[in-house]
Amino acid sequence: MNTLISVGTNAAFLFSLVLTFHPAAFRSTGVHHAVYYETSAVIITLVLFGRMLEARAKARTTQAMSALLALRPVAAHVERDGQIADVDPADVVAGDVLVVRPGERLPVDGVVLDGYSSVDESLLTGESLPVDKKQDDTVTGGTLNVSGSFRYRATRVGNETTLAQIIRLVERAQGSKAPVQRLVDWISAVFVPTVIAISAVTFFVWWAFGPDPALHFAVLNAVAVLIVTCPCALGLATPTAIMVGTGRGAEMGIFIRSGETLERVGRLTTVVFDKTGTLTRGEPVVTGVHAVGTTPAEEVLVLAASAEARSEHPLGAAIVRNAAERSLPLLSCDEFSAEPGHGLRATIGNRVVLIGNAALMHEQGVRLDAGKSVAEEIQAKGATAVFVALDGLLEAVFEIADTPKPHAAEVIAALKRDGLRVIILTGDSRRTAEAIASQLGADEVIAEVRPGAKADYVAALQRNGAVVAMVGDGVNDAPALAQADIGIALGTGSDAAMETAGITLIGGDLRSVRKAIALSRATLRTIRQNLFWAFIYNVAGIPIAAGVLYPVNGMLLDPMLASAAMAMSSVSVVTNSLRLRRWNA
Protein backbone atom coordinates (compact mmCIF):
# COMPACT_ATOMS: atom_id res chain seq x y z
CA MET A 1 0.00 0.00 0.00
CA ASN A 2 3.03 2.20 0.24
CA THR A 3 3.63 1.67 -3.48
CA LEU A 4 1.38 4.52 -4.58
CA ILE A 5 2.88 6.95 -2.05
CA SER A 6 6.40 5.94 -3.10
CA VAL A 7 5.70 6.25 -6.82
CA GLY A 8 3.97 9.63 -6.42
CA THR A 9 6.54 11.32 -4.19
CA ASN A 10 9.48 9.91 -6.15
CA ALA A 11 7.95 11.10 -9.42
CA ALA A 12 7.59 14.63 -8.04
CA PHE A 13 11.05 14.57 -6.49
CA LEU A 14 12.84 13.17 -9.58
CA PHE A 15 11.07 15.65 -11.87
CA SER A 16 12.23 18.49 -9.59
CA LEU A 17 15.76 17.05 -9.47
CA VAL A 18 16.04 16.97 -13.24
CA LEU A 19 14.63 20.51 -13.47
CA THR A 20 17.17 21.73 -10.90
CA PHE A 21 20.30 20.25 -12.45
CA HIS A 22 19.27 20.23 -16.14
CA PRO A 23 16.95 23.21 -16.62
CA ALA A 24 17.96 23.41 -20.31
CA ALA A 25 15.97 20.26 -20.95
CA PHE A 26 12.75 22.26 -20.42
CA ARG A 27 13.68 25.67 -21.88
CA SER A 28 12.46 24.66 -25.32
CA THR A 29 8.87 24.73 -24.03
CA GLY A 30 9.16 28.49 -23.36
CA VAL A 31 7.33 28.07 -20.03
CA HIS A 32 8.79 28.40 -16.55
CA HIS A 33 8.38 25.13 -14.62
CA ALA A 34 8.17 24.92 -10.84
CA VAL A 35 9.98 22.37 -8.67
CA TYR A 36 8.04 20.09 -6.29
CA TYR A 37 10.46 19.39 -3.44
CA GLU A 38 8.01 20.86 -0.94
CA THR A 39 5.22 18.71 -2.38
CA SER A 40 7.21 15.49 -1.81
CA ALA A 41 8.29 16.63 1.66
CA VAL A 42 4.82 17.71 2.79
CA ILE A 43 3.21 14.53 1.43
CA ILE A 44 5.68 12.33 3.32
CA THR A 45 5.30 14.46 6.46
CA LEU A 46 1.52 14.26 6.36
CA VAL A 47 1.57 10.52 5.66
CA LEU A 48 3.94 9.90 8.58
CA PHE A 49 1.82 12.14 10.81
CA GLY A 50 -1.25 10.16 9.77
CA ARG A 51 0.59 6.89 10.49
CA MET A 52 1.51 8.19 13.92
CA LEU A 53 -2.14 9.00 14.70
CA GLU A 54 -3.13 5.65 13.24
CA ALA A 55 -0.54 3.79 15.34
CA ARG A 56 -1.71 5.51 18.51
CA ALA A 57 -5.30 4.63 17.71
CA LYS A 58 -4.39 1.03 16.81
CA ALA A 59 -2.49 0.67 20.08
CA ARG A 60 -5.77 1.28 21.87
CA THR A 61 -7.33 -1.63 19.96
CA THR A 62 -5.05 -4.08 21.79
CA GLN A 63 -5.68 -2.79 25.30
CA ALA A 64 -7.85 -5.81 26.10
CA MET A 65 -4.95 -8.15 25.32
CA SER A 66 -2.60 -6.01 27.40
CA ALA A 67 -5.06 -6.22 30.29
CA LEU A 68 -5.14 -10.03 30.00
CA LEU A 69 -1.35 -10.27 29.94
CA ALA A 70 -1.17 -8.01 33.00
CA LEU A 71 -3.20 -10.59 34.95
CA ARG A 72 -0.19 -12.90 35.08
CA PRO A 73 1.45 -12.62 38.53
CA VAL A 74 5.23 -12.46 38.80
CA ALA A 75 5.58 -14.96 41.68
CA ALA A 76 3.77 -17.87 43.32
CA HIS A 77 3.96 -18.79 47.03
CA VAL A 78 4.40 -22.59 47.05
CA GLU A 79 4.64 -24.90 50.08
CA ARG A 80 7.70 -27.11 49.66
CA ASP A 81 9.52 -29.10 52.36
CA GLY A 82 7.49 -27.41 55.06
CA GLN A 83 8.48 -23.94 53.87
CA ILE A 84 6.77 -21.33 51.67
CA ALA A 85 8.98 -20.51 48.69
CA ASP A 86 8.48 -17.82 46.07
CA VAL A 87 8.82 -19.40 42.62
CA ASP A 88 8.13 -18.40 39.05
CA PRO A 89 4.52 -19.31 38.14
CA ALA A 90 5.93 -21.24 35.14
CA ASP A 91 7.67 -23.59 37.61
CA VAL A 92 4.47 -24.54 39.48
CA VAL A 93 3.40 -28.14 38.80
CA ALA A 94 0.03 -29.80 39.20
CA GLY A 95 -0.42 -30.96 42.80
CA ASP A 96 1.61 -28.12 44.36
CA VAL A 97 -0.01 -26.41 47.34
CA LEU A 98 -0.03 -22.62 47.05
CA VAL A 99 -0.76 -19.84 49.52
CA VAL A 100 -2.57 -16.69 48.41
CA ARG A 101 -2.61 -13.52 50.50
CA PRO A 102 -4.99 -10.54 50.29
CA GLY A 103 -4.41 -8.32 47.25
CA GLU A 104 -2.50 -10.97 45.28
CA ARG A 105 -3.37 -12.55 41.95
CA LEU A 106 -3.65 -16.32 41.71
CA PRO A 107 -0.81 -17.84 39.63
CA VAL A 108 -2.59 -21.00 38.40
CA ASP A 109 -5.97 -22.77 38.48
CA GLY A 110 -6.82 -25.00 41.41
CA VAL A 111 -9.13 -26.13 44.21
CA VAL A 112 -9.31 -24.49 47.65
CA LEU A 113 -7.98 -26.70 50.46
CA ASP A 114 -8.72 -24.43 53.41
CA GLY A 115 -9.42 -20.80 54.22
CA TYR A 116 -12.08 -18.38 53.05
CA SER A 117 -11.89 -15.33 50.79
CA SER A 118 -13.58 -13.21 48.12
CA VAL A 119 -12.06 -13.30 44.65
CA ASP A 120 -12.48 -10.63 41.96
CA GLU A 121 -13.06 -12.46 38.64
CA SER A 122 -14.27 -9.40 36.71
CA LEU A 123 -11.55 -9.30 34.04
CA LEU A 124 -12.18 -12.94 33.15
CA THR A 125 -15.95 -13.31 33.54
CA GLY A 126 -17.29 -9.76 33.47
CA GLU A 127 -18.88 -10.37 36.90
CA SER A 128 -18.57 -7.07 38.77
CA LEU A 129 -18.94 -8.43 42.33
CA PRO A 130 -16.27 -10.54 44.07
CA VAL A 131 -17.13 -14.24 44.38
CA ASP A 132 -16.84 -15.98 47.76
CA LYS A 133 -14.47 -18.96 47.80
CA LYS A 134 -14.28 -21.70 50.42
CA GLN A 135 -13.03 -25.27 50.75
CA ASP A 136 -13.48 -27.41 47.58
CA ASP A 137 -14.35 -24.37 45.40
CA THR A 138 -12.43 -23.96 42.15
CA VAL A 139 -10.30 -20.87 41.58
CA THR A 140 -8.83 -19.47 38.38
CA GLY A 141 -5.33 -18.17 37.71
CA GLY A 142 -5.16 -14.42 37.07
CA THR A 143 -8.08 -13.56 39.34
CA LEU A 144 -7.52 -11.18 42.29
CA ASN A 145 -7.81 -12.28 45.90
CA VAL A 146 -9.65 -9.36 47.51
CA SER A 147 -9.82 -10.33 51.18
CA GLY A 148 -8.76 -13.23 53.34
CA SER A 149 -6.10 -15.84 52.75
CA PHE A 150 -6.37 -19.44 51.63
CA ARG A 151 -4.40 -22.47 50.50
CA TYR A 152 -5.21 -24.27 47.29
CA ARG A 153 -3.94 -27.19 45.25
CA ALA A 154 -2.83 -26.52 41.66
CA THR A 155 -4.81 -28.45 39.05
CA ARG A 156 -3.96 -26.62 35.80
CA VAL A 157 -0.59 -25.01 35.26
CA GLY A 158 1.42 -23.40 32.46
CA ASN A 159 -0.34 -23.34 29.10
CA GLU A 160 -3.25 -25.37 30.49
CA THR A 161 -4.58 -22.63 32.80
CA THR A 162 -7.82 -20.90 31.94
CA LEU A 163 -6.00 -17.57 31.53
CA ALA A 164 -3.44 -19.06 29.11
CA GLN A 165 -6.23 -20.62 27.02
CA ILE A 166 -8.11 -17.31 26.95
CA ILE A 167 -4.99 -15.43 25.81
CA ARG A 168 -4.48 -17.96 23.00
CA LEU A 169 -8.11 -17.58 21.92
CA VAL A 170 -7.85 -13.79 21.81
CA GLU A 171 -4.50 -13.86 19.98
CA ARG A 172 -5.92 -16.27 17.41
CA ALA A 173 -9.04 -14.16 16.91
CA GLN A 174 -7.18 -10.86 16.62
CA GLY A 175 -4.74 -12.34 14.12
CA SER A 176 -7.43 -13.97 11.99
CA LYS A 177 -8.92 -12.67 8.77
CA ALA A 178 -12.60 -12.49 8.01
CA PRO A 179 -13.50 -13.82 4.54
CA VAL A 180 -14.37 -10.27 3.48
CA GLN A 181 -10.75 -9.26 4.24
CA ARG A 182 -9.49 -11.77 1.69
CA LEU A 183 -11.70 -10.04 -0.87
CA VAL A 184 -10.26 -6.68 0.21
CA ASP A 185 -6.71 -8.03 -0.18
CA TRP A 186 -7.52 -9.18 -3.71
CA ILE A 187 -9.09 -5.82 -4.58
CA SER A 188 -6.05 -3.99 -3.21
CA ALA A 189 -3.72 -6.20 -5.27
CA VAL A 190 -5.65 -5.31 -8.44
CA PHE A 191 -6.27 -1.74 -7.33
CA VAL A 192 -2.63 -0.64 -7.13
CA PRO A 193 -1.59 -1.41 -10.74
CA THR A 194 -4.94 -0.04 -11.95
CA VAL A 195 -4.34 3.28 -10.16
CA ILE A 196 -0.79 3.49 -11.53
CA ALA A 197 -2.26 3.03 -15.02
CA ILE A 198 -4.90 5.74 -14.35
CA SER A 199 -2.16 8.05 -13.07
CA ALA A 200 -0.13 7.47 -16.24
CA VAL A 201 -3.18 8.20 -18.42
CA THR A 202 -3.85 11.35 -16.37
CA PHE A 203 -0.27 12.51 -16.90
CA PHE A 204 -0.31 12.03 -20.68
CA VAL A 205 -3.81 13.52 -21.14
CA TRP A 206 -2.86 16.68 -19.21
CA TRP A 207 0.53 16.89 -20.92
CA ALA A 208 -1.07 16.57 -24.36
CA PHE A 209 -4.25 18.60 -23.90
CA GLY A 210 -3.83 20.63 -20.71
CA PRO A 211 -3.28 24.42 -20.52
CA ASP A 212 0.19 25.90 -20.14
CA PRO A 213 2.29 24.95 -18.33
CA ALA A 214 0.93 21.51 -19.34
CA LEU A 215 3.80 19.55 -17.76
CA HIS A 216 3.18 21.28 -14.43
CA PHE A 217 -0.50 20.24 -14.44
CA ALA A 218 0.38 16.75 -15.68
CA VAL A 219 2.84 16.10 -12.82
CA LEU A 220 0.60 17.51 -10.07
CA ASN A 221 -2.54 15.65 -11.17
CA ALA A 222 -0.74 12.36 -11.77
CA VAL A 223 0.84 12.56 -8.30
CA ALA A 224 -2.52 13.54 -6.75
CA VAL A 225 -4.15 10.43 -8.27
CA LEU A 226 -1.43 8.21 -6.80
CA ILE A 227 -1.63 9.77 -3.34
CA VAL A 228 -5.38 10.14 -2.89
CA THR A 229 -6.12 6.53 -3.89
CA CYS A 230 -3.65 4.84 -1.55
CA PRO A 231 -5.81 1.95 -0.20
CA CYS A 232 -4.55 2.21 3.39
CA ALA A 233 -8.07 2.66 4.74
CA LEU A 234 -9.18 -0.49 2.92
CA GLY A 235 -6.41 -2.47 4.57
CA LEU A 236 -7.32 -1.19 8.02
CA ALA A 237 -11.11 -1.56 7.71
CA THR A 238 -11.36 -5.23 8.74
CA PRO A 239 -8.42 -5.97 11.09
CA THR A 240 -8.96 -2.94 13.33
CA ALA A 241 -12.65 -3.77 13.81
CA ILE A 242 -11.83 -7.42 14.57
CA MET A 243 -9.13 -6.42 17.07
CA VAL A 244 -11.40 -4.01 18.93
CA GLY A 245 -14.47 -6.25 18.75
CA THR A 246 -12.73 -9.38 20.01
CA GLY A 247 -10.91 -7.31 22.63
CA ARG A 248 -14.20 -5.88 23.90
CA GLY A 249 -15.60 -9.40 23.97
CA ALA A 250 -12.64 -10.59 26.05
CA GLU A 251 -13.37 -7.85 28.59
CA MET A 252 -16.94 -9.20 28.87
CA GLY A 253 -15.98 -12.87 29.12
CA ILE A 254 -16.86 -13.54 25.46
CA PHE A 255 -14.10 -15.13 23.38
CA ILE A 256 -14.58 -15.18 19.60
CA ARG A 257 -12.32 -17.65 17.81
CA SER A 258 -11.97 -15.99 14.39
CA GLY A 259 -13.09 -13.33 11.95
CA GLU A 260 -14.93 -16.03 10.01
CA THR A 261 -17.14 -16.60 13.05
CA LEU A 262 -18.07 -12.91 13.02
CA GLU A 263 -19.25 -13.11 9.42
CA ARG A 264 -21.31 -16.23 10.05
CA VAL A 265 -23.10 -14.59 12.96
CA GLY A 266 -24.19 -11.86 10.57
CA ARG A 267 -26.14 -14.47 8.58
CA LEU A 268 -27.53 -16.32 11.61
CA THR A 269 -31.18 -17.47 11.43
CA THR A 270 -31.56 -20.16 14.10
CA VAL A 271 -30.27 -20.72 17.65
CA VAL A 272 -30.39 -24.28 19.02
CA PHE A 273 -30.01 -24.75 22.80
CA ASP A 274 -29.08 -27.92 24.61
CA LYS A 275 -31.37 -28.16 27.64
CA THR A 276 -29.65 -29.86 30.55
CA GLY A 277 -26.86 -27.73 32.00
CA THR A 278 -27.34 -25.03 29.37
CA LEU A 279 -30.89 -23.71 29.80
CA THR A 280 -31.38 -25.55 33.10
CA ARG A 281 -29.17 -25.86 36.16
CA GLY A 282 -28.27 -29.46 35.32
CA GLU A 283 -29.12 -30.78 38.80
CA PRO A 284 -32.46 -31.70 40.40
CA VAL A 285 -34.04 -29.25 42.83
CA VAL A 286 -37.00 -29.73 45.16
CA THR A 287 -39.59 -27.27 43.87
CA GLY A 288 -42.46 -28.35 46.14
CA VAL A 289 -43.33 -30.51 49.15
CA HIS A 290 -47.04 -31.40 48.97
CA ALA A 291 -48.43 -32.82 52.21
CA VAL A 292 -51.31 -35.26 51.50
CA GLY A 293 -51.61 -36.91 54.93
CA THR A 294 -51.73 -35.89 58.58
CA THR A 295 -48.01 -35.21 59.09
CA PRO A 296 -46.84 -31.57 58.54
CA ALA A 297 -44.77 -31.03 55.39
CA GLU A 298 -41.70 -29.83 57.34
CA GLU A 299 -41.66 -32.94 59.51
CA VAL A 300 -41.92 -35.16 56.44
CA LEU A 301 -39.01 -33.27 54.88
CA VAL A 302 -36.83 -33.79 57.99
CA LEU A 303 -37.47 -37.54 57.96
CA ALA A 304 -37.01 -37.83 54.18
CA ALA A 305 -33.74 -35.86 54.22
CA SER A 306 -32.43 -37.89 57.16
CA ALA A 307 -33.04 -41.08 55.19
CA GLU A 308 -31.69 -39.72 51.89
CA ALA A 309 -28.46 -38.57 53.59
CA ARG A 310 -27.39 -42.20 53.37
CA SER A 311 -28.27 -42.37 49.65
CA GLU A 312 -26.14 -41.44 46.62
CA HIS A 313 -29.08 -40.85 44.26
CA PRO A 314 -29.29 -37.34 42.71
CA LEU A 315 -32.96 -36.98 43.70
CA GLY A 316 -32.02 -37.88 47.26
CA ALA A 317 -29.26 -35.26 47.22
CA ALA A 318 -31.86 -32.67 46.13
CA ILE A 319 -34.02 -33.51 49.14
CA VAL A 320 -31.02 -33.21 51.51
CA ARG A 321 -30.07 -29.83 50.00
CA ASN A 322 -33.61 -28.55 50.40
CA ALA A 323 -33.61 -29.43 54.09
CA ALA A 324 -30.23 -27.72 54.52
CA GLU A 325 -31.52 -24.58 52.79
CA ARG A 326 -34.34 -24.45 55.32
CA SER A 327 -31.85 -25.04 58.20
CA LEU A 328 -33.67 -28.21 59.27
CA PRO A 329 -31.75 -30.67 61.50
CA LEU A 330 -31.16 -34.24 60.31
CA LEU A 331 -31.97 -37.24 62.52
CA SER A 332 -29.99 -40.41 63.02
CA CYS A 333 -30.95 -43.21 60.64
CA ASP A 334 -31.10 -46.60 62.39
CA GLU A 335 -31.69 -48.84 59.39
CA PHE A 336 -31.26 -48.17 55.68
CA SER A 337 -31.76 -50.24 52.56
CA ALA A 338 -31.81 -49.07 48.95
CA GLU A 339 -34.27 -50.44 46.45
CA PRO A 340 -32.44 -49.98 43.10
CA GLY A 341 -34.59 -48.35 40.46
CA HIS A 342 -37.40 -47.72 42.94
CA GLY A 343 -36.26 -45.82 46.05
CA LEU A 344 -35.30 -46.64 49.64
CA ARG A 345 -36.55 -47.87 53.00
CA ALA A 346 -35.23 -46.56 56.33
CA THR A 347 -36.01 -46.63 60.03
CA ILE A 348 -35.59 -43.38 61.99
CA GLY A 349 -36.48 -43.67 65.65
CA ASN A 350 -39.79 -45.52 65.69
CA ARG A 351 -40.83 -44.37 62.19
CA VAL A 352 -40.55 -46.47 59.06
CA VAL A 353 -39.76 -44.19 56.09
CA LEU A 354 -40.44 -45.26 52.52
CA ILE A 355 -39.31 -42.95 49.66
CA GLY A 356 -39.59 -43.69 45.96
CA ASN A 357 -41.75 -44.09 42.90
CA ALA A 358 -45.25 -45.49 42.48
CA ALA A 359 -43.92 -48.99 41.80
CA LEU A 360 -42.20 -49.11 45.22
CA MET A 361 -45.35 -47.87 46.95
CA HIS A 362 -47.49 -50.55 45.27
CA GLU A 363 -44.92 -53.21 46.12
CA GLN A 364 -45.00 -52.18 49.80
CA GLY A 365 -48.80 -51.96 49.90
CA VAL A 366 -49.02 -48.17 50.26
CA ARG A 367 -52.22 -46.68 48.82
CA LEU A 368 -51.64 -43.65 46.54
CA ASP A 369 -55.19 -42.35 46.28
CA ALA A 370 -54.47 -39.23 48.36
CA GLY A 371 -51.53 -38.20 46.20
CA LYS A 372 -52.63 -39.37 42.76
CA SER A 373 -53.97 -36.03 41.50
CA VAL A 374 -50.97 -34.14 42.93
CA ALA A 375 -48.57 -36.54 41.21
CA GLU A 376 -50.38 -36.13 37.89
CA GLU A 377 -50.12 -32.32 38.14
CA ILE A 378 -46.41 -32.59 38.91
CA GLN A 379 -45.77 -34.89 35.95
CA ALA A 380 -47.81 -32.63 33.64
CA LYS A 381 -45.29 -29.87 34.41
CA GLY A 382 -42.41 -32.15 33.37
CA ALA A 383 -41.20 -32.64 36.94
CA THR A 384 -40.62 -35.89 38.87
CA ALA A 385 -43.05 -37.01 41.60
CA VAL A 386 -41.39 -38.73 44.58
CA PHE A 387 -43.72 -40.36 47.10
CA VAL A 388 -42.95 -40.40 50.85
CA ALA A 389 -44.78 -42.83 53.14
CA LEU A 390 -44.47 -43.04 56.95
CA ASP A 391 -45.45 -46.26 58.71
CA GLY A 392 -47.25 -47.52 55.62
CA LEU A 393 -49.30 -44.38 54.94
CA LEU A 394 -48.68 -41.86 52.14
CA GLU A 395 -47.85 -38.50 53.74
CA ALA A 396 -46.33 -36.33 50.99
CA VAL A 397 -45.42 -36.04 47.34
CA PHE A 398 -42.16 -34.24 46.56
CA GLU A 399 -41.93 -32.25 43.33
CA ILE A 400 -38.38 -32.41 41.94
CA ALA A 401 -37.26 -30.78 38.70
CA ASP A 402 -34.24 -29.53 36.82
CA THR A 403 -35.16 -25.84 36.98
CA PRO A 404 -34.30 -23.20 34.35
CA LYS A 405 -31.27 -21.01 34.90
CA PRO A 406 -31.83 -17.36 35.81
CA HIS A 407 -32.53 -15.18 32.75
CA ALA A 408 -33.18 -18.19 30.45
CA ALA A 409 -36.67 -17.01 29.47
CA GLU A 410 -35.42 -13.42 29.14
CA VAL A 411 -32.62 -14.46 26.77
CA ILE A 412 -34.90 -16.56 24.55
CA ALA A 413 -37.43 -13.71 24.33
CA ALA A 414 -34.65 -11.29 23.35
CA LEU A 415 -33.33 -13.64 20.65
CA LYS A 416 -36.83 -13.98 19.21
CA ARG A 417 -37.19 -10.19 19.15
CA ASP A 418 -33.95 -10.14 17.15
CA GLY A 419 -35.69 -12.24 14.51
CA LEU A 420 -34.04 -15.58 15.40
CA ARG A 421 -35.78 -18.94 15.62
CA VAL A 422 -35.10 -20.64 18.97
CA ILE A 423 -35.10 -24.45 19.29
CA ILE A 424 -34.47 -26.65 22.35
CA LEU A 425 -32.68 -29.94 21.63
CA THR A 426 -32.57 -32.54 24.42
CA GLY A 427 -32.41 -36.22 25.24
CA ASP A 428 -35.08 -35.81 27.94
CA SER A 429 -38.60 -37.18 27.67
CA ARG A 430 -41.01 -35.26 25.46
CA ARG A 431 -43.24 -34.27 28.39
CA THR A 432 -40.34 -32.81 30.40
CA ALA A 433 -38.87 -31.06 27.35
CA GLU A 434 -42.20 -29.55 26.28
CA ALA A 435 -42.83 -28.28 29.81
CA ILE A 436 -39.48 -26.46 29.84
CA ALA A 437 -40.00 -25.14 26.29
CA SER A 438 -43.44 -23.79 27.23
CA GLN A 439 -42.04 -22.19 30.38
CA LEU A 440 -39.19 -20.50 28.48
CA GLY A 441 -41.08 -19.59 25.30
CA ALA A 442 -39.00 -21.51 22.72
CA ASP A 443 -40.34 -21.80 19.17
CA GLU A 444 -39.77 -25.54 18.96
CA VAL A 445 -38.54 -28.45 21.07
CA ILE A 446 -36.93 -31.68 19.87
CA ALA A 447 -36.94 -34.32 22.63
CA GLU A 448 -35.55 -37.83 23.17
CA VAL A 449 -32.55 -37.15 20.92
CA ARG A 450 -29.57 -39.46 21.37
CA PRO A 451 -26.25 -37.60 21.95
CA GLY A 452 -24.84 -38.66 18.59
CA ALA A 453 -27.99 -37.55 16.77
CA LYS A 454 -27.74 -33.90 17.87
CA ALA A 455 -25.19 -33.15 15.14
CA ASP A 456 -27.45 -34.91 12.59
CA TYR A 457 -30.36 -32.65 13.55
CA VAL A 458 -28.20 -29.53 13.19
CA ALA A 459 -27.08 -30.77 9.76
CA ALA A 460 -30.73 -31.26 8.75
CA LEU A 461 -31.49 -27.64 9.67
CA GLN A 462 -28.53 -26.50 7.56
CA ARG A 463 -29.72 -28.53 4.57
CA ASN A 464 -33.00 -26.66 4.80
CA GLY A 465 -31.18 -23.35 4.47
CA ALA A 466 -30.82 -22.35 8.14
CA VAL A 467 -27.64 -20.74 9.47
CA VAL A 468 -27.39 -22.39 12.88
CA ALA A 469 -25.80 -21.45 16.19
CA MET A 470 -25.60 -24.32 18.68
CA VAL A 471 -25.33 -23.47 22.39
CA GLY A 472 -24.11 -26.26 24.67
CA ASP A 473 -21.82 -27.19 27.53
CA GLY A 474 -21.28 -30.94 27.65
CA VAL A 475 -18.98 -33.47 26.00
CA ASN A 476 -22.04 -34.87 24.20
CA ASP A 477 -22.64 -31.42 22.69
CA ALA A 478 -19.18 -31.23 21.06
CA PRO A 479 -20.19 -32.92 17.73
CA ALA A 480 -23.21 -30.60 17.37
CA LEU A 481 -21.09 -27.55 18.25
CA ALA A 482 -18.60 -28.55 15.55
CA GLN A 483 -21.37 -29.19 12.99
CA ALA A 484 -23.14 -25.85 13.59
CA ASP A 485 -22.20 -22.74 11.64
CA ILE A 486 -21.42 -21.11 15.00
CA GLY A 487 -20.79 -23.20 18.11
CA ILE A 488 -21.27 -21.34 21.41
CA ALA A 489 -19.88 -23.10 24.50
CA LEU A 490 -20.54 -22.14 28.10
CA GLY A 491 -17.32 -21.88 30.09
CA THR A 492 -18.86 -23.89 32.93
CA GLY A 493 -18.96 -26.90 30.62
CA SER A 494 -16.48 -29.41 29.28
CA ASP A 495 -13.12 -28.76 27.60
CA ALA A 496 -14.33 -30.70 24.54
CA ALA A 497 -17.26 -28.31 24.08
CA MET A 498 -15.06 -25.22 24.42
CA GLU A 499 -12.42 -26.63 22.03
CA THR A 500 -14.92 -27.14 19.19
CA ALA A 501 -16.89 -23.91 19.68
CA GLY A 502 -16.41 -20.74 17.63
CA ILE A 503 -17.45 -18.62 20.63
CA THR A 504 -16.67 -19.46 24.26
CA LEU A 505 -18.47 -17.77 27.15
CA ILE A 506 -16.67 -17.68 30.48
CA GLY A 507 -19.23 -18.51 33.15
CA GLY A 508 -22.75 -19.85 32.85
CA ASP A 509 -24.73 -16.60 32.49
CA LEU A 510 -27.07 -17.15 29.54
CA ARG A 511 -27.30 -13.42 28.90
CA SER A 512 -23.82 -13.70 27.44
CA VAL A 513 -25.27 -15.73 24.54
CA ARG A 514 -27.24 -12.76 23.27
CA LYS A 515 -24.36 -10.40 24.06
CA ALA A 516 -22.00 -12.59 21.99
CA ILE A 517 -24.37 -12.55 19.01
CA ALA A 518 -25.04 -8.81 19.35
CA LEU A 519 -21.31 -7.99 19.69
CA SER A 520 -20.44 -10.11 16.65
CA ARG A 521 -23.10 -8.33 14.61
CA ALA A 522 -21.91 -4.92 15.84
CA THR A 523 -18.33 -5.80 14.83
CA LEU A 524 -19.45 -6.98 11.39
CA ARG A 525 -21.52 -3.81 10.99
CA THR A 526 -18.43 -1.72 11.81
CA ILE A 527 -16.38 -3.64 9.22
CA ARG A 528 -19.02 -2.91 6.59
CA GLN A 529 -19.12 0.79 7.54
CA ASN A 530 -15.32 0.98 7.30
CA LEU A 531 -15.26 -0.73 3.91
CA PHE A 532 -18.08 1.43 2.54
CA TRP A 533 -16.40 4.72 3.44
CA ALA A 534 -12.98 3.49 2.34
CA PHE A 535 -14.34 2.44 -1.07
CA ILE A 536 -16.37 5.63 -1.46
CA TYR A 537 -13.33 7.73 -0.60
CA ASN A 538 -11.17 6.00 -3.20
CA VAL A 539 -13.83 5.91 -5.92
CA ALA A 540 -14.68 9.61 -5.43
CA GLY A 541 -11.05 10.65 -5.05
CA ILE A 542 -9.78 9.32 -8.40
CA PRO A 543 -11.81 11.56 -10.77
CA ILE A 544 -11.32 14.64 -8.57
CA ALA A 545 -7.55 14.06 -8.41
CA ALA A 546 -7.45 13.42 -12.16
CA GLY A 547 -8.95 16.88 -12.71
CA VAL A 548 -12.38 16.09 -14.22
CA LEU A 549 -13.83 19.11 -12.38
CA TYR A 550 -11.27 21.52 -13.85
CA PRO A 551 -13.25 22.29 -17.04
CA VAL A 552 -16.37 22.96 -14.91
CA ASN A 553 -15.11 25.10 -12.03
CA GLY A 554 -11.32 25.16 -12.35
CA MET A 555 -10.88 22.86 -9.32
CA LEU A 556 -7.71 20.78 -8.97
CA LEU A 557 -6.64 18.66 -6.00
CA ASP A 558 -3.20 19.61 -4.73
CA PRO A 559 -1.12 16.49 -3.93
CA MET A 560 -0.43 17.88 -0.45
CA LEU A 561 -4.16 18.08 0.26
CA ALA A 562 -4.58 14.61 -1.23
CA SER A 563 -2.01 13.22 1.21
CA ALA A 564 -3.77 14.90 4.15
CA ALA A 565 -7.12 13.49 3.02
CA MET A 566 -5.60 10.03 2.58
CA ALA A 567 -4.09 10.11 6.07
CA MET A 568 -7.34 11.24 7.66
CA SER A 569 -9.30 8.50 5.87
CA SER A 570 -7.10 5.89 7.60
CA VAL A 571 -7.46 7.59 10.97
CA SER A 572 -11.24 7.82 10.54
CA VAL A 573 -11.49 4.06 9.86
CA VAL A 574 -9.50 3.24 13.02
CA THR A 575 -11.53 5.75 15.05
CA ASN A 576 -14.77 4.19 13.84
CA SER A 577 -13.50 0.77 14.93
CA LEU A 578 -12.58 2.17 18.36
CA ARG A 579 -16.25 2.94 18.98
CA LEU A 580 -16.64 -0.78 19.70
CA ARG A 581 -14.63 -0.32 22.89
CA ARG A 582 -17.67 1.44 24.37
CA TRP A 583 -20.13 -1.17 23.05
CA ASN A 584 -22.63 -2.61 25.50
CA ALA A 585 -25.65 -4.81 24.93
Image (cartoon, rainbow, N blue to C red):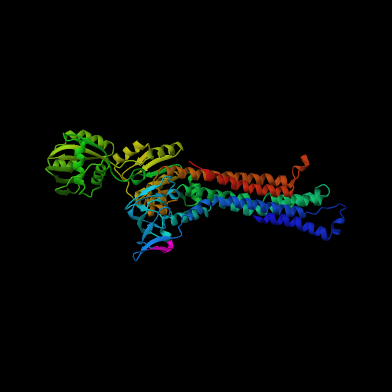
Residue 496, picture quadrant: bottom left
Q: Is residue 399 magenta?
A: no
* Residue farthest bottom in this picture: 81
Residue 447, picture quadrant: top left
Residue drawn at (38%, 41%) of the image: 423
- Nearest the viewer among 393 and 459 is 393
**Viewport quadrant of the N terminus:** bottom right
Residue drawn at (37%, 59%) of the image: 98
Residue 161, picture quadrant: bottom left
| Count of numbered marks | 0
- Nearest the viewer among 103 and 467 is 103
Question: Visible in this render: residue 194?
Answer: no
- Nearest the viewer among 274 and 292 is 292
- Nearest the viewer among 87 and 213 is 87
Counting from the top left corner in percent of width and height, residue 246 is at 50, 49
Question: Visible in this render: residue 535?
Answer: yes
Counting from the top left corner in percent of width and height, residue 50 is at 65, 51
The span shown in magenta is 84-92
Is 105 placed left or right of 26 in the picture? left
Is 485 placed left or right of 354 in the picture? right
Counting from the top left corner in percent of width and height, residue 139 is at 38, 53
Is 185 placed left or right of 506 in the picture? right
Residue drawn at (34%, 55%) of the image: 111
Counting from the top left corner in percent of width and height, residue 569 is at 64, 47
